[in-house]
Amino acid sequence: MTELLQILGLPLLACIVIGAVLAYLGIHVLKREVIFVDIAVAQVAAVGAIAAHLAFHVEENTPIAYAASFACVTLISAFYALARHKISEISIEAVIGISYAITAAAGLFLIGIAPGHAHAQEMLAGNLLWVTGRDIIWILFAFCLVGVCLYTFRKPLSSTSDDYNAAATQGLNVVWWDFMFYLLLGVVITLAVQVGGVVTVFAFLIIPATTSALFSTRLAHRMLIGLTVVSVASILGLLFSYYLDFSIGPPVTLFLGILLGLAALLGKCVKGSRTP
């Protein structure tokens, strides 16, 4: 038991911390109907890190690489906010998909001229098993700052997510609050992907929020459900990976999907039992 805690304690803590923040952001993402924004933002951040590697010969997880990633995330956040406001002929989800395709191509091109750069593989798989206490402290510090911003600006952010056009009609600066949301989301995703990988982070962002939407519309209830899903899937996924000697990310993602399926069946059963 002691050995199990020593090996899986920090990865479990990382999963719960990352999953908790992403569960909240995922509720906004579903309302905004920008499901694939995390993959696009993660790809943009990767391009920034690879560009820093080429320009300054630095590796991942260095201040210069992070600065380059955040600069790219800031630019794409501004672009998404302006595109949603200015481009009415194309949905924002389509704009996000196009930007992902372009930045993915750019990333592959940069990797091609930067041999030895392993960012692409690490971005997909993550390194949950090798997460350290220092990583947890850094993530907690950054996520606490993001959490303070989300709480402080919760009303305009929620108004923009709930009904973009109504918020604009009421005089809210929707472009600015859209930019703020994408920027905060980008900060979380940039850090989370370094640890969890793109696939697991995407699952944490979408699946707990989707599961909670099956049972409630109240934010407090949805967060409680989301945290439960994150915790259960993380524990089961980590145990699966420990006893079967498997990487951590895929089992956690698998159990998130299983819990969503079970929740959907439970929701149907509850509704069926209430039908006269």
Image (cartoon, rainbow, N blue to C red):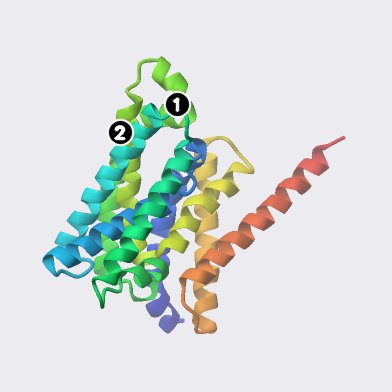
> At which x and y percent is residue 13?
39, 64
* Residue 151 in view (yes/no): no
The answer for how far apart the CA atoms under marks 1 and 2 are is 19 Å
Q: What amino acid does circle 2 point to?
A: Thr
Q: Residue at x 35, y 26 (%)?
A: 174
Quarter of the rendering containing residue 3? bottom left
Q: Secondary structure at mark 2?
A: helix
Position above or below: 151 against 119: above
Picture disc at residue 152: 2
Residue carrying label 1: 164
Quarter of the rendering containing residue 15? bottom left
Q: Residue at x 31, y 36 (%)?
A: 179
Residue at far right of view: 276
Q: Residue at x 49, y 45 (%)?
A: 223
> At which x and y percent is residue 232?
54, 62
> At which x and y percent is residue 252?
51, 67
Q: Nearer the viewer, residue 6 or 212?
A: 212
Q: Nearer the viewer, residue 48 or 104?
A: 104
Q: What amino acid does circle 1 point to?
A: Tyr
